[in-house]
Amino acid sequence: MDLNLSDEQRLLRESAERFITESYDADHRRRMANDPLGFSPAVWKQFAELGWLALPIPEAYDGLGGGAVDVGILMEAFGRGLVSEPYVATVVLGAGLVEKRGGEQQKQGILPRIADGTLKLALAHSERGARFDLSNVATVANKTVQGWRLSGTKIAVLDGHAADQIIVSAHIHDHQGPSGRIGLFLVPAQTPSLVISDFARLGGGRACNIEISDVHLPEDSRLGGSDDALPAIEWAVDRAMAALGAEAVGIMQTLLDMTLEYTKIRKQFGRPLSANQVIKHRLADMAIQCDESRSMALRAALRADAEPVERARAASGAKAKIGKCARFVGEQSIQLHGGMGVTEELEVGAYFKRLIAFDTLFGGSAHHYRRHAELGRTTVPA
Amino acid sequence: MDLSFNAEERAFQAEVNDFIARNLTDEMKRATALTPSVFSDPDIGMAWQRALHRRGWGAPGWPVEHGGPDWTPAQRWIFETECARAGVPNVNVMGVKMVGPVIIGFGSPEQKNFYLPRILSGEDYWCQGYSEPGSGSDLSSLKTRAVRDGDDYIINGTKIWTTHAHHANRMFALVRTSDGPRQQDGISFILIDMKTPGITTRPILTIGGDHEVNQVFFDDVRVPAANRVGDEGKGWTYGKYLLEFERGSGIASAKLREGLRAIAELAESDLTGRAIDDADISTRISEVEVDIDALEMTELRVLSALQTGQNPGAVSSILKLRNSEIRQAVTRLGADVIGHDALAVEPMRPLYKLNHEPAIPEDMLTVMPEYLNGRAYTIFGGTSEIQRDIIAKMMLGI
């Protein structure tokens, strides 16, 4: 039992923090907020050179074979810089699903190109009617003579506008009709009759909605075999939630640091705000919730490869708890900055908005406490 | 980085479980489950302490030369966790975990030789004389005075919230030996034999129905000056050192988890009409469980840091604060889960020696008293407000 960072992990943390401090400043973030792409291809190239895109990819596919804890270390630093590059979409969700589901040829064709930065992926899974239920997929994949015909509408596809290929989930309809199984399909972003409408995402980066109308795909576009892809989707989303939780920790810590600094400098009634006990206690609560969140993100990462129920409960527990803490820390950061906190002149608002986006993505706290409870019930005999 | 135990740690875990299986009697287990107050009564608690001592495990945190087992932080974690799972008695911590470390750190060789073996064996039973009616959170304003008279001090004053003073044969106390420029100056740390003439004890009943705390009065109580620990006037330093131990040896999550498990079992039973089928109850159980998960991870992070010789610092205040708040959440949930049965009051103590049939099932007997007594967790050992002051000062520098 040992929760200390290894030497490699310490180096990773140092290099990620150094990169953020030196290269990812407020000017960069402001430029990216108004950029049609929402991120910098030059920075993406640097991520590749630093080995970060290869981090969780198996060594057999030119990756570094890192785990969820390593990704968490990187993501916490990304949170501090409010990084808007499509890391979760491409490396965590995209590469994760290809590794988990893909056939050997698919893995060989895709994973090394993610690692070297020449290929980006996105996952199109959420639908309006499903809310946060991962098993609810109305998009249909009909079996055709040559392959598949997909139709449906996907929403909130993270960084879909920048992807070279989009992994689309669909309910498989084979020759016998609806199969009750979900399939995953690799769809080239340039496919005609794929209508991608992208928009700026709350807190930085971009997302899109995708209209899929009778898209014809070859047989080998299916990621993996004919079995149900839902367990792999749940696995990948749990992993993404752990990674995003670590990112949220970096954001919360940054907000706490900013707010602490501000309350020391800002004087009212002839003394710094931080001299008031009500302010001290608020900041103490923010510090406690940052620390609890750090514990939960690490816990979810350490269980990312555990058996499904344990993994899912750890991921949902972390998502719910960090989401709750994130809203508190974010809202209090604005409150303690007073009027300035609600302006675009400070960066507090941008960090706050990313936290709100985190809490909403893949379902908020209430949803994940409920999922945690339901999964717990099945393991305890009534 | 990983959470799994290595072969040695697994072997130790088996050793602990074997010890528990051999020494934890059904009577001890039932008495512990039916004790709603913080500590087990001395007959139960000291029986367990004697068993631990026979095995050489009487004082896990002590150095080897004074009888400590020389465990790694991971071993301490395993020991505490397995003990919590098994439901072993809650031994009064005043001896082993509080006055013991102070005597080891600051006591004379004579004091070490005399007191430490008697703490280990359970021969001495200690209580703590810190708070006074006029000195709660502002502890260093204390007024109980010790005036030097030859080789003795003569003590006058009163102490309050003295847990198990009615069972204890010894007290460690903070007393004022002089008035310094700061109120923290002039406080001394002294060991008092509770049988000394002039000491009287008044019981204080708390809202859960238990007699656990007392007020102790000192009227011209003559105590040898040799019973002072360390330097005269330096007691505040020793007393604060001790409070860091009171605020947490850093392993509280395992007991919280067992408390929640008991409540969840009640919620799943027909006794409560399956309270768990209420979506609000079921979600709240998850919320509390997740809070325990977070506390457990923080405890493990602190343990790992200790393993490499780092100092946890103000994180002991975070652990104390969260442990107390989560305990209250568990007991509040318990009171909601048992529904109408929360209305039944059982005034007799101890609950494991009732000579009548209680009004509600035995498994529920402690639920409401634990909720009521639980209100004290955010007050004793430094209130939550004081802990937040410490976190702000030590962690945030404000």
Image: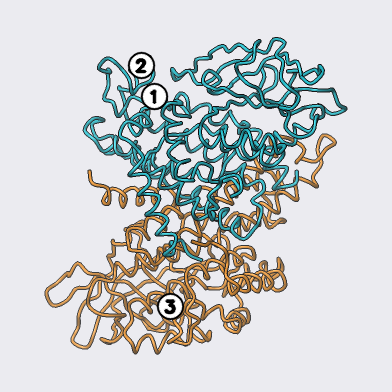
Chain colours: A orange, B cyan
Which residue ends up furthest to the right in the rendered image? B181
Left or right: residue B328 compared with residue B119? left
- The label nearer to you, 2 versus 3, is 2
Q: Are marks 1 and 3 on the same chain?
A: no
**Which percent across, then down, holds residue B272?**
26, 30
- The kind of residue on which mark 3 rests is Ala
Chain designation of label 3: A
Secondary structure type for disc 2: loop
* Marks 1 and 3 close (CB-CB < 8 Å): no
Q: Nearer the viewer, residue B346 or A245?
A: B346
- The kind of residue on which mark 2 rests is Val
Query: How many labels were placed on the picture?
Result: 3
- When asked about the image quadrant of residue A185, the answer is bottom left
Q: Are marks 2 and 3 on the same chain?
A: no
Is residue A323 shown to the viewer in this render?
A: no
Task: Report the residue marked by disc 3.
Answer: A95
Residue drawn at (72%, 56%) of the image: A345
Q: Which mark is residue B345?
A: 2
